Image (tube, grey):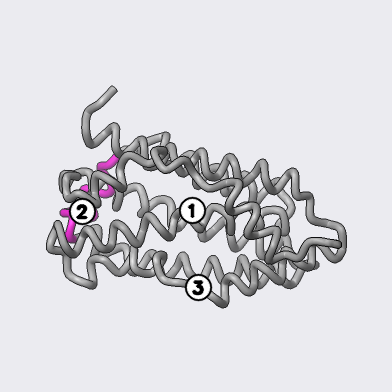
């Protein structure tokens, strides 16, 4: 019996779930032990990640012109990045990030590897394969954001406005899930979905995301 997109998304997400110990930064924030400068680094890096990912998603939507389900998924992702960018600014301001600090900041290579790879996918990977890889990756990201939003309120005294960026990604996105499922199902139905390739893309996305968090953690703690 052929698998459905729902089953494939569920199994792929499970297979690519990160090691619970792969992210040292979020537990530090959850305990209220991350310095404000470390949170500022997170904001500064995200100010570069968000617009880069938005451009990549728009390009994927254009490339998926013949795959309407995938195009709709990436269009919605791009729109979400626009909203996320707006919500990021209050968090950055609460961390002491202004325009002068942003322009003087040198981004960490380990943090920018993730958007660089998303851009690579936008140029080289099948849009439908990328839908599967990115959707599996988003599961862990949403959980991290939920933990951070809670800690910002309880341990750092941040206002709701300053937590909105993380709230945005932490909340369920049923419409996006529906579009992902439709895109993957279309790929299964037409035989154009390469599960092995998608799994490889997802594995690298998870690795680059782990590197993102680790890079900020190491910079903030001064550990080798």
SS at circle 3: loop
- Between residue 123 and residue 130, name the one nearer to us: 130
Q: Where is residue 96 in the image (x, y as percent from the top left)?
A: 16, 54
Decide if residue 169 is on the left or right side of residue 99: right
> Magenta residues, as a range?
94-105
The residue beneath circle 1 is: 52
Q: Residue at x 19, y 45 (%)?
A: 34
Q: Which residue is drawn at 42% across and 35% down?
A: 110
Asked which quadrant contains residue 89, the reply is bottom left
Residue 173: give its label. Answer: 3
How packed mark 2 is, by other alpha carbons closer than 10 Å (few <14, some 14-19, many 20 or more), is many
Q: In which quarter of the image is the C terminus?
A: top left
The residue beneath circle 2 is: 97
Decide if residue 40 is on the left or right side of residue 138: left
Residues under numbered marks 3 and 2 in contact, where contact means CB atoms less than 8 Å apart:
no
Tell me the distance, in whole angstroms, between the alpha carbons under discs 3 and 2.
29 Å
Q: Residue at x 71, y 57 (%)?
A: 127
Q: Position of residue 152 (x, y in %)?
A: 21, 60
Mark 3 against mark 2, which lies toward the viewer?
A: 3
Tell me the distance, in whole angstroms, between the alpha carbons under discs 1 and 3.
21 Å
């Amino acid at each position: 019996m052929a698998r459905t997109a729902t089953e494939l998304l569920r199994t792929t997400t499970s297979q690519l779930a990160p090691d619970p110990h792969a992210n040292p930064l979020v537990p530090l924030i959850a305990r209220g032990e991350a310095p404000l400068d470390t949170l500022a680094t997170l904001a500064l890096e995200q100010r570069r990640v968000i617009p880069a990912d938005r451009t990549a998603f728009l390009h994927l939507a254009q490339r998926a012109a013949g795959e309407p389900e995938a195009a709709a998924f990436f269009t919605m992702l791009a729109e979400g990045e626009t909203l996320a960018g707006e919500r990021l600014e209050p968090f950055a301001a609460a961390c002491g990030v202004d325009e002068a600090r942003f322009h003087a900041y040198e981004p960490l290579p380990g943090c920018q590897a993730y958007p660089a790879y998303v851009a690579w996918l936008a140029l080289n990977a099948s849009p439908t394969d990328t839908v599967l890889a990115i959707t599996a990756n988003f599961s862990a990201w949403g959980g991290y954001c939920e933990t951070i939003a809670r800690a910002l309120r309880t341990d750092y005294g941040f206002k709701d406005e300053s937590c909105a960026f993380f709230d945005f990604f932490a909340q369920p996105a049923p419409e996006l899930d529906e579009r992902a499922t439709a895109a993957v199902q279309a790929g299964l139905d037409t035989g154009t979905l390469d599960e092995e390739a998608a799994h490889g893309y997802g594995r690298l996305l998870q690795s680059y995301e782990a590197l993102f968090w680790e890079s900020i953690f190491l910079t903030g703690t001064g550990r080798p």
